Every structure is written in structure tokens, then in C-alpha cells.
Amino acid sequence: MRRSIPTEPLPTDIRRQVRSRLGRRVFAAALGVFLALGALGFYGVRTRTVSAAAGGYELSVRYASVSRPGLATPWSLEVRRPGGFPEGITVAVMSSYFDFFDENGLDPAPMEETSDGERTFWTFGPSTADTISVSFDARIEPGVQLTRAKGRAEILAGAPGTTGATVVGVDFGTWVMP
Amino acid sequence: MEIIVRATIIYFVLWALARGVGKRELSEMTAFELILLVTMGDLIQQGATQEDMSLTGAVLAVGTLAMWILLFAYLSWRFRPLRSALEGVPVVVIHHGEPLDEVLAIERLTLDEVCEAARNQGILDLAEIDIGVLEPDGKFSFLKTSGKATQQGSPEKHAG
């Protein structure tokens, strides 16, 4: 004798359907908010500029406060000094910050580049212009995720090539999204 | 923002592609077409996310496609005139047991394909069919003269 296996579905539970619809609406709303934040650039790349002035120098660093792996991420430094830089200038940057980047180089390239392990020193030659601008062409490394990259840039006193005391410095950081 | 715009463009291109290829091709999937589909997915990914290798970028792209799917589904449900434009319309291909040759030609359907679809539903003669419909998703629905409706999956390609 054949066994009867009914294929009739369970009775419809309207309350359950209403709850399910509410769940779908909440999901759609959350998706809309997520995409709206994305459209506004909340997840990067977002840029900021930090500045400080002391000892006759004005230092500005433009950096990405939020970025994502693989994306071109801006970083540039600008130093202003009325009367120019007759003896050149030495800039010190925290080396660990730039470990997060796949770099294509600094523009303009420094006359000399040295490092003490913690900091990298870039020496630029004399210039009659009041402003020296340096930009870094780089992308966040694909393997770097969910990290806060902290950095610091300083102008050093003394003759170029010597690691003298800090005249002026700024802190910055980049939050790398997953 | 860029990734959302790119994903949106890709959604509309794919939608136009799906609407443009025709109902029959939409429901058929040969091994070669499956390979093409996978290749298309790979090409599309590059266009949408480019060098963005982040999880956030991937979720943004997928989320954008999901949002357009939801929006199209809502518009299709809310506005009847839009439904035919967004999803297509069912087409009667057999009426009172007679194949409508002009409709079959427009839909690039052969009589062999209709017969095969009918056979799959246990119909031995097209005369048994009151109305045969090619649905917007490319599947056939047959309403027999007794009033019993049947539907089948993808029809196979046959020359003739």
C-alpha cells in the first residue's frame, strides 16, 4: 500500500508574513543608508589637511583620513617660509606610516634620503621660492585592512642633512577600511 | 561614490542585455553560454571595482546591484504600466490548439521547441492545448482544454 505524503503547504500565518515584511523593509532601509554613506565618501577616500607654524616655518600636510586597500591615497606636504630656503631644508617623517603604502615615489625627489629606523629624513636643496611642495604617489597595500596608520612630519633645525631639533611638526593618521 | 555609479551603470547594461536577448535565450543555458556568463562576471567585476581590493568596495558594488533589484521589483509591483517595460509580457503562442506562426517567428521559436515543451508536460497533441503561453522568463505555460494548467522549464534548442 502506498504511503500518502501530502504536498499541501502549511496554513498561511499572516502575523509571520507581516514580521517578515518588516524585516525586509528594515534591511532595505539599512542598505539605503549604507549606500548613501558610501556615495558621500564616508568609507574613503576622505582627505584632510593639518597645519602648524613655528620658527618662521608653516607646515601643512594633506592626507587621507580614511582610505581602502588598493586605492590611490593622497599624501602631500607643503612648507612655507617667507624669503625661501637659501640653505635647503630637512623634513623628517615617521617611517612606519609609509609601510602601509605601495609607493611610486616622491615628487620632487629629495636630494638625500636617510633613515634612523624610526624616522625617514628627506633633504631638499636650496630654493628661492617661499613654498616647497612635496607629494607622494602611493596606494594602500591590498593586504592592509582595518588598521589605523599613524604618522608625523617635522621640519628639522640645523643645516640640511643633519638631524637637528624639531622646529615644527604635525600629526596625522589614516584609517584603512576593511 | 565612483564605485556606486559604476555598479549602477553595469546593472542597467545587464538589465538591457537580459531584456534584449529575448525570452527564449533568457531561459536557455548551454554549456558555452554558462562559460560566457562566468567570463562576463569577471569582466564586469573589473569594471565595477577597478583597483579597489577592499571588502567595503565589494559590499558597496553588490549592495548597489541589490538596491536596484529591490527598486525595480517595487516599481514593477506598484506601477502596472512599468511592469511590462521592466519585466516583459507573456505572449500567447498557441490558441485553441493552433500555433500562431507570426508570434513564433517574432519570438524566434520553432514549432519543434513548442512541441518538445508540450511533450515534457505529457501533451501528445497540440490540439489538447487551449492556450499556450511563452512567459516573460522564457518558460512555457499550457492551459489544456480541460482547464488544467501546466508549466515547464527551459525549452531545448532544435533546428527546424
Image (cartoon, grey):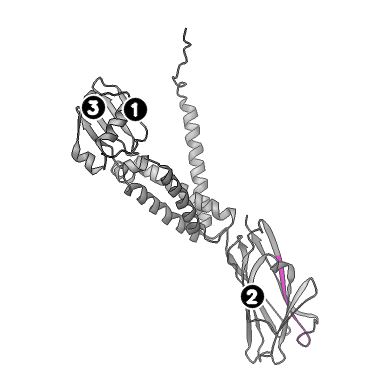
Q: Position of B79 compared to A11: left or right?
A: left
Q: Residue at x 28, y 40 (%)?
A: B159
Res A105 label:
2
Q: Earlier in the sequence, mark 3 or mark 1?
A: 1
Horizontal and vertical percent for residue A138? 62, 69
Q: Residue under circle 1?
A: B120
Query: The disc labelled 3 sits on which kind of residue?
Result: Leu
Q: Residue furthest top?
A: A1
Label 3, on which residue? B126
Query: Which residue is pictured at 52% across the width and 60% down the height?
Result: B50
In terms of depth relative to the viewer, which is nearer, A41 or A161? A161
Mark 3 — on which chain does it sit?
B
Q: Nearer the viewer, mark 3 or mark 2?
A: 3
Q: Which quadrant, please, contains the C terminus of chain B? A: top left
Which amino acid is tagged 1?
Asn
Q: Do discs 3 and 1 share a chain? A: yes
| Residue B37 in magenta stretch | no
Q: Position of residue A120 (x, y in %)?
A: 75, 75
Residue range (magenta): A150-161
In the current view of this chain or complex, which residue is farthest to the front?
B159
Q: Is residue A37 above or below residue B75?
A: below
- Image height of A39 relative to B147, above or below: below
Label 2, residues with CA under 10 Å away: few <14, some 14-19, many ≥20:
few
Along the viewing direction, whichever of A76 and A96 lies nearer the viewer: A96
Res A43 quadrant in image: bottom right
Q: Are marks 2 and 1 on the same chain?
A: no
Give the label on residue A119, or none. Answer: none
Chain at tag 2: A
Residue A173: name its quadrant: bottom right
